[in-house]
Image: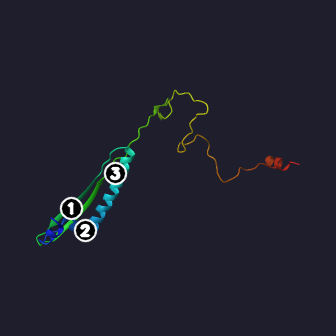
């Protein structure tokens, strides 16, 4: 049955209803979510080197009062594909904390790992922007090059 067959009997085809519901916002939101979901599933499938799946759900609540007025509420929900998890290995250090370096591994010269930038350094804070004060002895030594 085509759309015309429903409409001529006073019925509304679903696609026509969807385009008119909430002044077209239901169709626009469902289309936007659908397009985004397809891209996310495609990307997840490429990252996993296999299959990925998602789901889009359009819920429509219809309430009709005794005067024949219909109230339409809708919601669009998506179930996005899960991101692939990465597994890391760490070791329990001598102090009980976790470390990426095996606690009994002796350092090999030239292969010391650089400390990540986000790890606080155990050094005195330095002041940036001001030169160190020059003492009277330093000032006289610098000027006596002749």
Cα distance in 3D space between marks 3 and 2: 26 Å
Residue nearer the viewer, 145 or 17: 17
At horizontal 32% and vertical 61% (from top left) the residue drawn is 32
Left or right: residue 98 compared with residue 69: right
Left or right: residue 67 compared with residue 23: left
Residue nearer the viewer, 64 or 129: 64
At horizontal 53% and vertical 28% (from top left) the residue drawn is 105
- What residue did someone put label 1 on? 60
Q: Nearer the viewer, mark 2 or mark 1?
A: 2
- What residue did someone put label 3 on? 41
Q: Residues within 10 Å of mark 2 (few under 14, many from 20)?
A: some
Q: Position of residue 99 (x, y in %)?
A: 49, 34
Q: Residue 27 sits in which quadrant?
A: bottom left
Q: Residues within 10 Å of mark 1 (few under 14, many from 20)?
A: some
Q: Which mark is residue 26?
A: none
Earlier residue among tags 2 and 1: 2
Q: Which mark is residue 19?
A: 2
């Amino acid at each position: 049955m085509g759309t015309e067959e429903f409409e001529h009997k006073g019925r509304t085809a679903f696609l026509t209803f969807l385009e008119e519901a909430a002044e077209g916002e239901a169709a626009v939101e469902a289309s936007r979510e659908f397009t985004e979901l397809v891209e996310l599933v495609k990307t997840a499938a490429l990252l996993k080197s296999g299959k990925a799946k998602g789901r889009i759900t359009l819920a429509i609540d219809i309430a009709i009062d005794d005067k024949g007025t219909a109230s339409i509420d809708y919601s669009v929900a998506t179930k996005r594909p899960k991101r692939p998890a990465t597994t890391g290995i760490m070791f329990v250090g001598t102090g009980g904390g976790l470390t990426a370096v095996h606690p009994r591994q002796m350092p090999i010269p030239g292969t010391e790992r650089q400390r990540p930038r986000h790890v606080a350094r155990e050094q005195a804070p330095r002041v940036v922007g001001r030169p160190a004060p020059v003492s009277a002895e330093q000032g006289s030594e610098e000027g006596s090059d002749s």
